[in-house]
Image: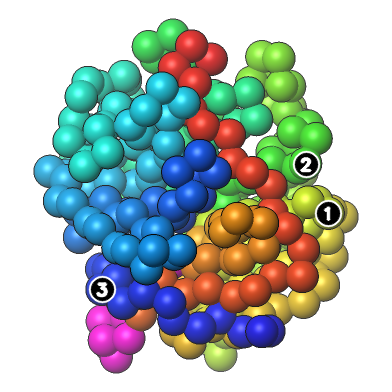
Amino acid sequence: MTRFERVLEARCELGESPVWSVERQALYFVDITGRRLHRYDPAAGRHESWPVDEDIGCVAPAADGGLVAAMRSGVWRLDEAGRKVRRLAANPEDPATSRFNDGKVDPRGRFLAGTLDEPKAGGKAGLYRLGGGRLARLVDGVLTSNGLAWSPDGRTLYHADTPRFVVRAYDYDLESGEIAGGRVFFERDATAADRARPDGAAVDQEGCYWSALYDGARVARHDPGGRLMAEYPAPTRKVTMPAFGGADLRTLYLTSARDPATGEGGDLYAMAADVAGLPPTPFDPAA
């Protein structure tokens, strides 16, 4: 299979943050503005979803059970049905104009999440690392934080600013969680005919970066140097984030947003990949 096909009619408004749990052999994802948590067990063909009480930007399984999620009001521990257990840190920005968006767990179990500047008025969003009950700001001046992923050795962090059509790479210190040496990994040229821009992302075992191109109906694979290797078409324009899953981590799942103009999208898609992905690290509350 060289293109994505629909595997689940999820009916999301804004599907995002797919993450595979190796332990649970299930895919979790969210509907940010539809305010739902989803869980999909492909082997059993079972799909469950639960309402949450605010916009939920991203989610990740926790090593001690339950989940960690970045929401409009801050970072929370949730149970398996999306119920709030406790807040780990408040949103350091104004929740009236900012919410959390993309987020992932680093190879040492730390949780990183970025925000979205909703008015797109000045790049007030950022990227944060959770630790010790507070959020440390790693990147400033962002419009929409997206595209988080790490290289296989964990020494490179990728981060996208979607409205600016750019993905940057940073040196990542696995011991401290600090970043340095920001540089352009790849940048897209917007045209009137093609407004495809880098949204969520995943990295495979060969170190290649798979980027969902929002409004572009495809996922792009870039080599570790940033060179475009291939593009894989999807059945809907507003693709949001890929994630490797399945027992062998060779199924590439893809979330999407509903297109208000056509009513298409919002479902979950998948494609068989020739290379396996990296097993996601569960959130470690002690990290």
What residue does disc 2 label?
152
Where disc 1 sits, the SS reads loop
Q: Quadrant of residue 110?
A: top right
Residue shown at 43%/77% (left/top)?
Answer: 7
Q: Quadrant of residue 58?
A: top left
What residue does disc 1 label?
206
Q: Is residue 204 left or right of residue 84?
A: right
> Is residue 43 visible from the viewing direction of this image?
yes
Amino acid, disc 1: Glu
Residue shown at 25%/22% (left/top)?
Answer: 87
Where disc 3 sits, the SS reads loop
Taking depth in this image into account, of 66 and 201 the one nearest to the observer is: 66
> What range of the chain is rendered magenta?
255-264
Residue shown at 44%/81% (left/top)?
Answer: 6
What residue does disc 3 label?
11
Taking depth in this image into account, of 91 and 1 the one nearest to the observer is: 1
Amino acid, disc 2: Pro
Q: Where is residue 34 in the image (x, y as percent from the top left)?
A: 20, 60
Q: In this view, does 46 lie to the left or right of 105?
A: left
> Is residue 158 visible from the viewing direction of this image?
no
Amino acid, disc 3: Arg
From this view, report whether residue 156 is shown above or below residue 111: below
